[in-house]
Image (spheres, rainbow, N blue to C red):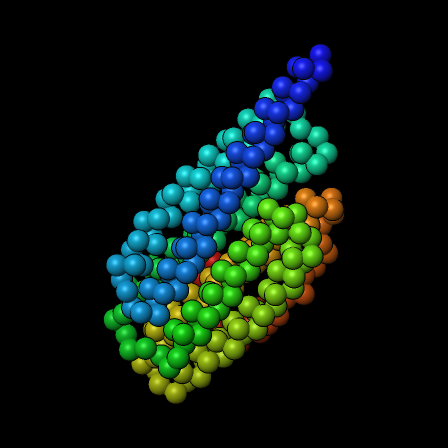
């Protein structure tokens, strides 16, 4: 009986290793998507933007495969306690990664429009810095998952406020450029949607880090995160630039 039990345990460990390897592969693709989307905007590279859009299919496929494999593991292995938290956390993380990939694809879509307009100040570089910070957060969130490092995960959660502050600054810069010259309105609208998408990427990375806290401790961080994005609470600002709810 001990031999059979050991065999089942070994097979289950391989299953867990397999889905965790897939989540890291998916994370790597999403990191590259963020980086390339930001670079395509900064360098006005339409070919690179198109590669980002085309690459989103691979991210979507991995999420589908991960969900199928995780469902199979739950059905066949009936994991409990920590093992169940591992499987559930992978499913939730894959959903957040897929969403980040969609937002990155949206960012790349707008590059083709923006190359038809003159650059607006240094906003493209500012957006690239903001995207780079989200990319670093994602890398650290994935590292915290592999290392089961709760402190690093909490650090990622706290850093989302920095991304919010970057977004707030950009939002007001766009308003200034629009007021100075109405010809800037179209470009600023697209740039705003890109900045907002990156801010939302930060929220999804934060959700991934929260899954690490859940996995390592069995608890979730406080549901009411302290958000530093104030634009949504200012009706005048929101009306001025609108919102881009659909990815």
Looking at this view, name the residue that lies furthest to the bottom.
180
The front one of 129 and 244 is 129
Q: Position of residue 50 (x, y in %)?
A: 29, 55
- Residue shown at the point (32%, 49%) measured from the top left: 54
Q: State the image coordinates of residue 127 (x, y, percent, origin top left).
A: 44, 70
> Toward the viewer: 241 or 165?
165
Q: Is residue 59 left or right of residue 225?
A: left
In the visual, does 176 lie left or right of 206? left
Q: Quadrant of residue 187?
A: bottom left
Q: Residue at x 42, y 45 (%)?
A: 59
Outermost residue, top side: 1
Residue plotted at (63% across, 48% down):
147
Q: Quadrant of the N terminus?
A: top right
Q: Is residue 189 visible?
A: no
Q: State whether residue 38 appears in this view.
A: yes
Image spot of residue 39 (x, y percent):
36, 65
Looking at this view, is 204 or 31 the one in front?
A: 31
Q: Quadrant of the C terminus?
A: bottom left
Direction from residue 230 to residue 151 in the image, left or right: right
Q: Is residue 201 above or below residue 88?
A: below
- Number of callouts: 0
Tell me which corner region of the image, top left, top right, bottom left or bottom right, holds residue 163. bottom right
Considering only vertical position in the picture, is 162 above or below 183?
Answer: above
Q: Position of residue 21 (x, y in %)?
A: 51, 39
């Amino acid at each position: 009986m001990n031999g059979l039990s050991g065999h089942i345990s070994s097979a289950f460990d391989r299953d867990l290793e397999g889905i965790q390897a897939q989540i890291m592969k998916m994370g790597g693709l999403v990191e590259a998507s963020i980086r390339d989307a930001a670079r395509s905007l900064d360098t006005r590279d339409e070919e690179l933007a198109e590669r980002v859009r085309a690459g989103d299919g691979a991210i979507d496929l991995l999420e589908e495969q991960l969900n199928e494999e995780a469902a199979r593991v739950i059905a066949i292995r009936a994991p409990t306690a920590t093992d169940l938290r591992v499987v559930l956390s992978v499913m939730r993380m894959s959903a957040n990664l897929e969403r980040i990939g969609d937002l990155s694809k949206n960012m790349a879509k707008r590059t083709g429009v923006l190359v038809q307009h003159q650059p607006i100040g240094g906003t493209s570089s500012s957006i690239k810095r903001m995207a780079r910070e989200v990319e670093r957060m994602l890398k650290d969130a994935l590292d915290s998952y592999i290392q089961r490092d709760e402190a690093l995960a909490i650090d990622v959660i706290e850093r989302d406020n920095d991304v919010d502050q970057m977004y707030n600054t950009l939002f007001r810069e766009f308003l200034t450029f629009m007021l100075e010259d109405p010809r800037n309105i179209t470009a600023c609208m697209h740039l705003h949607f890109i900045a907002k998408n990156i801010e939302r990427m930060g929220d999804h990375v934060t959700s991934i880090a929260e899954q690490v806290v859940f996995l390592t401790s069995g608890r979730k961080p406080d549901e009411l995160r302290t958000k530093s994005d104030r634009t949504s609470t200012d009706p005048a600002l929101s009306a001025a630039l609108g919102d881009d709810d659909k990815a």
